[in-house]
C-alpha cells in the first residue's frame, strides 16, 4: 500500500450497489481509498469536493449515476458542473485537475468500477503526493474573558455613549435585520460573550465601517468585531460561511508553501509583462471567483486584471507578475482566521521581497487595504511601496496628452468599502470618473464614505437580509437613471449580481455593471 | 581646433506682455550657457509689450560663437498669443518646430504639424497663471531637446523669485511630462496603437 489518501464520494443508489458487490466478493479495492457514502452526487458541493484537498487528500473521486438514471433527476448534471468548476480551481492552484474525477456506474458494473478505482489510484501515484500540508489544528483555548477585555479596552468600547447612531446607520439594521451594533457592544462589555445573540450577530456584521463613520466616540466597530472573531475562533466557535466555506478552504489551502500555483498562465498573449521589472502587479483572486461563479452568476472579474495590465501597458509600464501569487488573506483575516492570514501574508511578502520589487500595484481594494494597512499592523513589514492603480493612472493621465472617447452610457458608481471608507480614498475613483465623457454621471444617494456596501464581506453571514440590502442598493442605482453601474471591486460585482439572479425580481434589478478599469481601458486614447 | 558641425538653432518665443516671455528666453539662454556649456544670445523686444501688446524673445543657441543675435528664420517658434503667431508663423523654417498654447492660439491657415499644450490652463490649475511660461519651457525642453532638462530646471530655480522655487519646479516638471506624453502619444498613434 502506498501512503496516498484518496477520497471516494459514492452515491448511495446505483454505484453503491456495484461497490457493495465488490465488497461482498472481497475484491481487492485499493486500500488507499476511503469511501464516503452520499445520498446523491449532486449534493456534493464545490466546498465538499474541495475540502479533502485542503486536508491534504491526494485525489478525490465522485461517483454518481448515469445521466437519466439519477434518482432525483438533476443530480448528475449538477455534479458535472461542480466537478468541472472545482477542477478548474485545482488547475489554477497547481494541484492539477486530474486529481479530481467524476464518473458514473450502473448497479451491475462492478467489474468496470473496480478497474476504474485501480486506474485512478495508479494515476494519482504517477502524479504524486499532494503538496498541500494542512495547517496545524489549534486546540481551542478554554479561557477567553481576559482576551475579550483586552480587545474591548484596545478599541475603547467603554467610550460608547449608548447613543444608537451606529444602529441607525447600519445597513443590516436598515434592511430589517434584528441586529444592533450598539447592543452587541453592550453585551460584550457586560461580559456575556456566550449570549446566543452575540454568537450569531458577530458573524453577520459586514465590517463595512459605516457605524464607525458616525460614532461620536470613534469606536472602530468593524476592527473590534474582527478581533472578537479571532478570539471566538480560538475558543472553537465559527461563523456561518457562505458557499459552504469554499473560499476559506481555498485560502487555507494556499498556505502550503510547496504549491506550484499557476496564477497567471491564462493571461492573454498581447499583455506584456516583464519579470525583471521592479514594479509588480498584484492581481488578486478574480480568476478563482470567475470559475466558481461560472454557472451561477457568469461574472468576468478577470477582465479587471487584464484591463489593468492593458492600461499599464498603455503607459509603457510592463510590470512583473508573481506566478505563485496567493490570496492576500483579507477574507481569512475578517472571518476570524488570523493564523492562516499571517501564513498567507508571509508567503506573499517573502516572494515579493525575493523579486526585489520596489512598488506593488493592485486594482483590488481589499488587497490594497490589506497590504498597506493590515500587513504592517500584524507585524508583517514590507519593504516596497503599495499603490492602488487609480493613483498611478491619475498621475499618468494628469501628465497630459491622454483623453477619453465618448461613452454612450449614463453612469453611477458603487463605492468599494475598503478603498472609499476604510482607506478614506473616495476621491481616487472619482477623479478618474470625472475625466470620462459619458452621457451622464449621477451619484447614488448614499455615496463616498457614506455608501452602503454590496451586501457581503469575507464570505460569511450571507442571509436574506443581505439580499434585502442589495435590492435596496440596486434600486438606489436605478434611481439615478443610469444604465451602467461602475464598480471598483470584483466582489461588489459578484454580490450585487447575485441579487439580480433572484427568480422573482431579478429581471427588474438586472443592471449592467463594469469595473472602472475596464471602462477606462475601453475609452482611453492618446490625443 | 577641429571643425564642429553647425548645430546652431534659432528660436523665437512670442506672446503678450506680462506672460514672462522674456524671462522664459533668458532662462533658456542661461541653461544653455551655464548648464550645457554652449553659446547663446538673447534679444528681447521692448516697448508697449510690457503693457500687454505683442512681445517676443529671440534666442540663438550654438556650439560655436554667435556673430549675429537676431533671428530671421526660426527653427523653433513658441507662440503664447494669437498675434505673435500671426506675426512670426511666416518666418518659421519649413522643417522647423511649432509649439503653441492651445487655448490662446488657433493655428489657422497652416498645413504643418505642431505641438500644443494648455499651459495657461495648467498654470491656473496649479494656482498661478504667471507660471504658464515655465510650463511652456518644460514642454519646449521635452519636445525640442534643444537643451538638457537638468540645465533648464536649475536655471528655473535660479531665476524665479525666492520662495517660489518649488512651485516653479513643479510647473516645469508638469510641462516637461506633458511634452513627453505628447511625444509618446504620437509614437503610439504612428504605430496604430492609440488605445489601450
Ligand atoms: S460595520 Fe457595518 S454591518 Fe457592521 S455593525 Fe457597523 S454598520 Fe453594521
Ligand atoms: S455610535 Fe458609538 S457611541 Fe453611539 S451607540 Fe454606537 S458605538 Fe456607542
Ligand atoms: S451575496 Fe450571493 S455571491 Fe455573495 S456571498 Fe451571498 S450568496 Fe454568495
Image: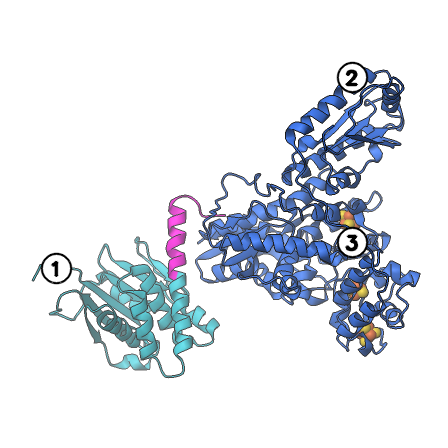
Chain colours: A blue, B cyan
**Lower position in the chain sequence, tag 2 or tag 3:** 2
The chain that hosts pointer 2 is A
Other residues around mark 1 within 10 Å, as few (<14) / some (14–19) / many (≥20): few
Magenta residues, start to end: B179-196
Q: Residue at the location (87% across, 27% down)?
A: A73
Q: Secondary structure at mark 2?
A: helix
Q: Which mark is residue A112?
A: 2
Residue A81 x %, y %: 75, 33
Which residue position holds label 1? B4
Q: Quadrant of ligand 1?
A: bottom right
Residue A498 x %, y %: 77, 47
**Marks 2 & 3 on one chain:** yes
Distance of label 3 from label 1 (alpha carbons): 80 Å
Which residue position holds label 3? A138
Above or below, A333 against A132 in this view is: below
Q: Quadrant of residue A24?
A: top right
Overall secondary structure of the magenta stretch?
helix
**Marks 3 & 1 on one chain:** no
The chain that hosts pointer 3 is A
Amino acid at each position: 500500500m502506498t501512503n496516498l489518501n484518496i477520497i471516494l464520494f459514492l452515491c448511495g443508489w446505483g454505484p453503491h450497489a456495484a461497490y457493495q458487490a465488490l465488497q461482498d466478493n472481497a475484491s481487492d479495492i485499493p486500500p488507499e481509498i476511503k469511501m464516503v457514502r452520499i445520498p446523491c452526487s449532486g449534493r456534493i458541493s464545490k466546498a465538499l469536493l474541495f475540502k479533502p484537498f485542503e486536508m491534504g487528500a491526494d485525489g478525490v473521486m465522485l461517483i454518481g449515476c448515469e445521466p437519466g438514471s439519477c434518482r432525483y433527476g438533476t443530480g448528475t448534471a449538477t455534479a458535472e458542473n461542480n466537478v468541472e468548476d472545482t477542477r478548474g480551481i485545482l488547475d489554477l492552484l497547481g494541484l492539477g485537475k486530474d486529481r479530481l474525477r467524476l464518473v458514473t456506474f450502473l448497479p451491475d458494473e462492478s467489474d468496470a468500477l473496480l478497474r476504474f478505482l485501480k486506474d485512478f489510484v495508479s494515476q494519482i501515484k504517477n502524479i504524486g503526493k499532494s503538496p498541500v500540508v494542512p495547517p496545524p489544528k489549534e486546540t481551542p483555548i478554554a479561557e477567553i474573558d481576559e482576551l475579550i477585555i483586552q480587545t474591548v479596552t484596545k478599541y475603547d468600547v467603554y467610550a460608547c455613549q449608548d447613543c444608537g447612531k451606529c444602529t441607525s446607520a447600519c445597513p443590516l439594521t436598515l434592511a430589517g435585520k434584528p441586529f444592533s451594533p450598539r447592543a452587541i457592544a453592550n453585551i460584550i462589555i457586560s461580559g456575556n460573550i456566550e449570549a446566543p445573540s452575540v454568537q450569531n450577530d458577530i458573524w453577520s456584521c459586514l465590517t463595512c465601517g459605516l457605524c464607525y463613520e458616525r460614532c461620536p466616540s470613534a469606536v472602530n466597530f468593524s476592527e473590534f468585531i474582527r478581533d472578537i472573531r479571532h478570539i471566538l475562533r480560538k475558543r472553537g466557535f465559527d461563523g456561518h460561511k457562505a458557499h459552504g466555506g469554499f473560499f476559506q478552504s481555498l485560502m487555507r489551502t494556499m498556505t502550503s508553501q510547496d504549491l506550484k500555483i499557476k496564477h497567471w498562465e491564462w493571461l492573454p498573449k498581447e499583455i506584456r509583462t516583464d519579470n525583471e521589472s521592479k514594479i509588480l502587479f498584484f492581481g488578486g483572486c478574480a480568476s478563482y471567483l470567475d470559475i466558481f461563479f461560472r454557472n451561477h452568476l457568469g461574472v468576468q472579474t478577470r477582465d479587471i486584471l487584464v484591463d489593468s495590465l492593458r492600461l499599464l501597458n498603455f503607459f509603457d509600464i510592463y510590470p512583473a507578475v508573481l506566478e505563485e501569487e496567493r490570496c492576500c488573506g483579507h477574507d481569512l483575516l475578517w472571518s476570524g482566521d488570523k493564523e492562516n492570514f499571517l501564513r498567507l501574508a508571509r508567503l506573499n511578502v517573502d516572494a515579493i521581497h525575493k523579486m526585489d520589487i520596489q512598488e506593488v500595484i493592485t486594482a483590488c481594494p481589499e488587497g490594497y487595504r490589506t497590504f498597506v494597512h493590515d500587513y504592517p499592523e500584524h507585524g508583517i513589514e514590507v519593504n516596497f511601496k503599495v499603490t492602488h492603480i487609480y493613483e498611478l493612472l491619475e498621475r499618468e493621465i494628469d501628465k497630459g496628452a491622454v483623453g477619453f472617447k465618448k461613452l454612450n452610457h449614463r453612469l453611477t458608481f458603487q463605492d468599494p468599502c475598503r478603498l472609499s471608507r476604510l482607506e478614506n480614498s473616495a476621491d481616487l475613483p472619482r477623479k478618474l470618473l470625472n475625466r470620462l465623457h459619458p452621457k451622464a454621471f449621477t451619484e447614488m444617494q448614499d455615496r463616498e464614505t457614506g455608501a452602503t456596501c454590496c451586501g457581503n464581506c469575507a464570505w460569511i453571514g450571507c442571509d436574506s437580509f443581505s439580499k434585502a440590502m442589495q435590492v435596496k442598493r440596486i434600486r438606489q442605482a436605478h434611481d439615478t437613471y443610469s444604465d451602467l453601474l461602475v464598480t471598483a471591486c470584483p466582489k461588489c460585482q459578484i454580490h450585487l449580481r447575485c441579487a439580480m439572479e433572484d427568480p422573482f425580481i431579478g429581471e427588474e434589478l438586472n443592471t449592467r455593471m463594469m469595473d472602472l478599469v475596464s471602462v477606462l481601458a475601453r475609452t482611453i486614447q492618446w490625443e | 581646433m577641429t571643425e564642429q558641425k553647425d548645430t546652431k538653432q534659432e528660436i523665437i518665443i512670442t506672446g503678450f506682455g506680462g506672460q514672462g516671455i522674456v524671462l522664459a528666453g533668458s532662462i533658456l539662454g542661461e541653461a544653455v550657457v551655464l548648464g550645457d556649456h554652449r553659446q547663446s544670445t538673447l534679444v528681447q523686444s521692448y516697448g508697449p509689450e510690457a503693457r500687454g501688446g505683442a512681445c517676443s524673445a529671440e534666442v540663438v543657441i550654438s556650439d560655436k560663437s554667435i556673430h549675429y543675435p537676431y533671428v530671421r528664420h526660426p527653427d523653433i517658434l513658441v507662440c503664447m498669443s494669437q498675434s505673435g503667431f500671426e506675426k512670426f508663423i511666416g518666418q518659421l523654417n519649413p522643417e522647423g518646430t511649432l509649439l503653441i498654447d492651445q487655448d490662446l492660439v488657433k493655428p489657422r491657415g497652416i498645413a504643418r504639424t505642431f505641438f500644443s499644450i494648455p499651459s495657461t490652463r495648467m498654470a491656473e490649475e496649479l494656482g498661478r497663471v504667471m507660471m504658464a511660461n515655465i510650463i511652456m519651457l518644460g514642454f519646449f525642453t521635452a519636445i525640442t531637446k534643444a537643451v538638457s532638462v537638468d540645465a533648464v530646471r536649475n536655471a528655473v530655480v535660479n531665476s524665479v523669485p525666492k520662495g517660489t522655487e518649488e512651485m516653479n519646479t513643479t510647473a516645469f516638471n508638469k510641462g516637461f511630462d506633458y511634452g513627453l506624453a505628447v511625444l509618446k502619444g504620437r509614437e503610439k498613434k504612428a504605430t496604430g496603437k492609440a488605445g489601450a
